Amino acid sequence: MPTDAVPADVVPADVVPTDAGLTDAVSRPGGVLQVRDLDVHYGLGRRRRQALHGVSLQVEPGETVGVIGETGSGKSTFARTVLGLVPSSGGRIVIAGEDVTRYSHRQWRTLRRRGVVQYVFQDPLRSLDPDLTILESLIEPLLLQGAPRGGAGRRARALLRRVHLEEELLERRPGELSGGQRQRVALARALITEPALIILDEPVSALDSANRVQILQILKELRNSGVALIFISHDLGSVAGVADRIAVIYQGELVEVGPTRDVLAEPAHAYTRLLIGSVPMLRSAPADRTERDALRALLHA
Amino acid sequence: MVRRVLARPAGRLGAGILILIALLAILGPVLAPHDPLGSTPDPLVGISGQHWLGTDYLGRDVFSRLLHGSRESVVGSVEVALVALVVGVIPGLLSVYLGRVFEWTALRLADTLIALPFLVFAVAVTALLGNGITQAMLTVGVLVSPLFFRVARAATLTVARSQYVEYGLISGASIGWIIRRHVWAKVLPPIAVALAQTIGVGFIIVSSLTFLGIGVQPPAPTWGGLLASDLNYLNFQPFAPIAPAALIMATVWACNLLADAIRDVSGQAGRALTNTRRLGARRAGGSQPVLAKGRS
Amino acid sequence: MTTVSEDSARRGAVSEPVAPGSGPPVVLAVRDLRVHDRVSDREIVHGISFELTPGKVVGIVGESGSGKTLTCRAALGILPEHFVVSGGSITITGHDVAGLTPAQWTELRGSTISAVFQDPASYLNPSIRVGAQIAEVVRVKQGFSRRVARRRALDLLAAVQLRNPALVYEQYTYELSGGMLQRVLIAAAVAAEPTVLIADEATTSLDVIVQAEILDLLADLRDRAGLALLVVSHDLAVVAQICDEVLVMRRGDVVEHGSTAEVLRRPRHEYTRLLIAEHEQYGLEAYLDATTPQHQEPNHARQESNHAH
């Protein structure tokens, strides 16, 4: 059962969004992202499936929410719907005070160009154009906002430093960088428009230990700068260290939401308990075999 | 990209030969020392001071005939290539964006055209519409267009479904922006390669048709026609076919050289799309090998 | 199994005969193994040594490029074309593999030493039903008739804890999830009752819950059949959960080697410390160590009690 109740003062759809900057958007009631009773279907006719069912979630400015779920649970669909890439079939999405549920392509484009919400893909190699230099990839969001090249270039340099990369990488192409470096570039690119919210879909799954630690460290540092993060993963381990709150998605439904410590210490739903019990850990054993089998049986009932 | 292509020796050679041929086509008739249709009383004379490549069975200067004939062949093959390009590329690009009905229709049309044999059709068209090389080449152009359709479609599809394009959309890019910034550079190289190859093919088709006597009224000179008539008189002049054959070969070879050079200098994505020597190209480029997704 | 002692004697290689009554038989012995890359003319694995006895689980932790997969491949005789064993020895149930012919290797694989890898779907033929593929292994390795092989394949599918073996038998790879496919491959791997099973990143592409199930399954096989396991992973926790002994590899060197408890409690190399720190700082360790009562029994103690038989 979701422990988050969406507050009654959700901004009504007929409020006209202003072109106010980041700070204004962030200070509106309803936080940075508000999702209410979201339903998403895909497929046609007989093949129509429901990917998400009644999902409600609110993300406050500056907080990091970890969204956990297994493959096929709907967690990636959630991200894509919030970004406007997938149409919803029910419910409501409000981004920084703007109700985007019924937005047209043009309205989405205008909103996106404000750079309020950004995204980091799982596979940095595929999310960067292999024929463009790192500089070109980095400044694309700014160019879309209409920023001049000179200013955009300067910002790119500053951000590169922030993710601990050397400036000379700007002239290289993605194929010449390592996986960890590429992911940091993707992160810098997501930061370049000073977004209020960044959604990261499995940002460290494809990386090795050293790089993973580096990225997680950068994400931890980001929390202090006021950016809200939605960290989607199937790996509870990497999320736990960074997230303020955890939301668990199981078969298209949000089955548990709450502060990290509470969810991990006293998981309410059987799936969460099974999840926690399955994570391999160094010193303590995961849950007992029999306990896990019992939980699995409970879930399949 | 043009600069990079010319930087490669293959590119320079190919382009050089083609420019020469183009010049021949334009200036040929002007440079010809003799009237190509005028017979002289010295048939089948070998290479001499007066006739650089000798004369044919009617005493006409071979060199002059070649020069005049070049225009025919060049124009014909360029016609084929351009028609194929226009008829193929635009539907190819659009088939990705205009919805399933258009896509399905375009694909089935392309499939049908591929099944039809061009020489036969070219002959049929000239039979219907009269003996002119242009009609024949336009037909062949349409029949060759599925190549461009497929190439343009495949290139666009790969790019359109990619994550960096999706990222562009997330950042607020319009379709036009995406095409300009991401798609164009990746679609052009395979099309350029197809173009170069098609010009080569077009040359062979023109030569074949004119060899068969189709598409041009004798006694107008064409390379293929020259080749044909030369073959009748091999007993007397065994070296005669070499000149037109060599010209045809050189032109087609130059086209292929150019196509190779374009393919080699294409960006990483372009290279992958033109589907060649992947490992070799990456190592030569000096870039770090891409880490595989797995962790072994 | 063909004896290769004549070959070994001729080559002067060390052959370790099984000495009766001298402790549990060593089923896989790797001694100072070195692997050399002919293309780049470099040594990739700089000497790794460990021993497996029935029921023992040894783990190798390392990133891509550490040499862990080459070690596995050497033990299976499937090193890629330009890699060669340039030093040390590998002994499988007492026989040095150095002089083995391809035919002898084929004999050995499946019935003595077997393996499962990452990305299970790519190891199965997508156009043949999976049951038939397991039955094929049974027929080839154990010479049974079709009907008996089918029976045996169904038994194997049940043994790997698939809920509906008869249904899975008839399915194609695209109809099965990653976890189910990995079970199918484990079934195929143990079909001929090998003594040693190598799991090279076998759970890496699986979700965490499915991973736990597969690790449980491997532990089961160890308990029931006395299988010796070599578990390779980039995740120290996965290895720590199931292994008695751990080796940590980095760029071809073994930087740490000891019992699981020892390696976790007193890591000697800074790379090991980094791996441990990653879990402690960014993993569940921080949250669950103190709070929940269900996680009080340390991992290694459980394994010691398992070996009390």
Image: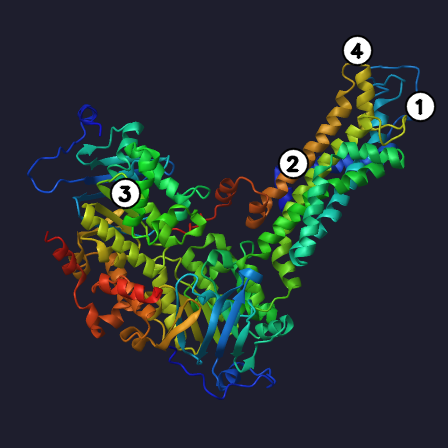
Mark 3 to mark 2 CA distance (whole Å): 55 Å
Q: Is residue C51 above or below residue C144?
A: below
Tag 4, which secondary structure?
loop
Q: Is residue A254 above or below residue B49?
A: below
Tag 2, which secondary structure?
helix
Q: Are marks 4 and 2 on the same chain?
A: yes
N-term-proximal mark, 2 vs 1:
1
Kind of residue at disc 2: Leu
Q: Which mark is residue B257?
A: 2
Tag 1, which secondary structure?
loop
Q: Which mark is residue C190?
A: 3
Q: Which mark is residue B38?
A: 1
Q: Nearer the viewer, residue A34 or A150?
A: A34
Identify the residue position indicated by label 4 in the image: B235
Mark 2 to mark 1 CA distance (whole Å): 37 Å
**Crowdedness near tag 1: few (<14), some (14–19) or many (≥20) residues, C-alpha within 10 Å:** few
Q: Nearer the viewer, residue A253 or C52?
A: A253
Kind of residue at disc 1: Gly
| Label 3 with label 4: CB-CB less than 8 Å | no
- Indicate the chain on which mark 3 is placed: C
**Crowdedness near tag 3: few (<14), some (14–19) or many (≥20) residues, C-alpha within 10 Å:** many
Q: Position of residue B78 (x, y in %)?
A: 77, 40
Q: Nearer the viewer, mark 3 or mark 2?
A: 3
Tag 3, which secondary structure?
helix
Q: Is residue C22 above or below residue B185?
A: above
